[in-house]
Image (cartoon, rainbow, N blue to C red):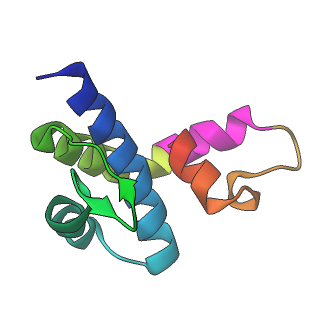
Amino acid sequence: MKPAERSGARLAVVQALYEMEISGKGVIDALAEFEAFWIGQVIDEVEHPPAETAFFRDLLRGTVDEQRAIDQRLDAALAAGWPLRRLEAVVRAILR
């Protein structure tokens, strides 16, 4: 597996987490959509890099499965008065 494909998978996971949060889609729909329409495609003149599909799947599913624990740790690490829910959706996706 090429390092660039692992990097592409990480970027796709952040994008998928963001999409899931703002659209309410589940992990299965997000996996299908990103694998079919986003990863390795050029959309509106924006190139979405190739990604190692199995790594993308593992990262997305693992993050979703552990999201409650991840969010608790992030809440604990944030400054008092700034719970995770106050951050923008894209920032939450990146942090997760």
Residue drawn 63% across the image and 39% down it: 74
Residue drawn 20% across the image and 40% down it: 51
The residue lying toward the viewer, choosing from 61 and 42, is 42
Residue drawn 21% across the image and 50% down it: 40
Tally of numbered tags: 0
Question: Residue 11 falls in which quadrant of the image?
Answer: top left
Question: Residue 38 falls in which quadrant of the image?
Answer: bottom left
> Height in image: 23 above or below 47?
below
Residue drawn 61% across the image and 61% down it: 89
Dominant SS in magenta:
helix
Residue 84 makes an appearance in the image = yes
The residue lying toward the viewer, choosing from 1 and 60, is 1
> Image check: 54 left or right of 85?
left
Residue 66 makes an appearance in the image = no
Q: Residue furthest front?
A: 45
Question: Residue 59 falls in which quadrant of the image?
Answer: top left
Quadrant of the snapshot with the N terminus = top left
Estimate the x, y position of residue 71 in percent, counting from the top left: 56, 47
Q: Is residue 77 magenta?
A: yes
Q: Residue furthest right?
A: 81
Q: Magenta region: which residues? A: 70-78
> Image check: 26 left or right of 86?
left
Q: Is residue 66 magenta?
A: no
Estimate the x, y position of residue 91 in percent, counting from the top left: 63, 49
The residue lying toward the viewer, choosing from 12 and 75, is 12
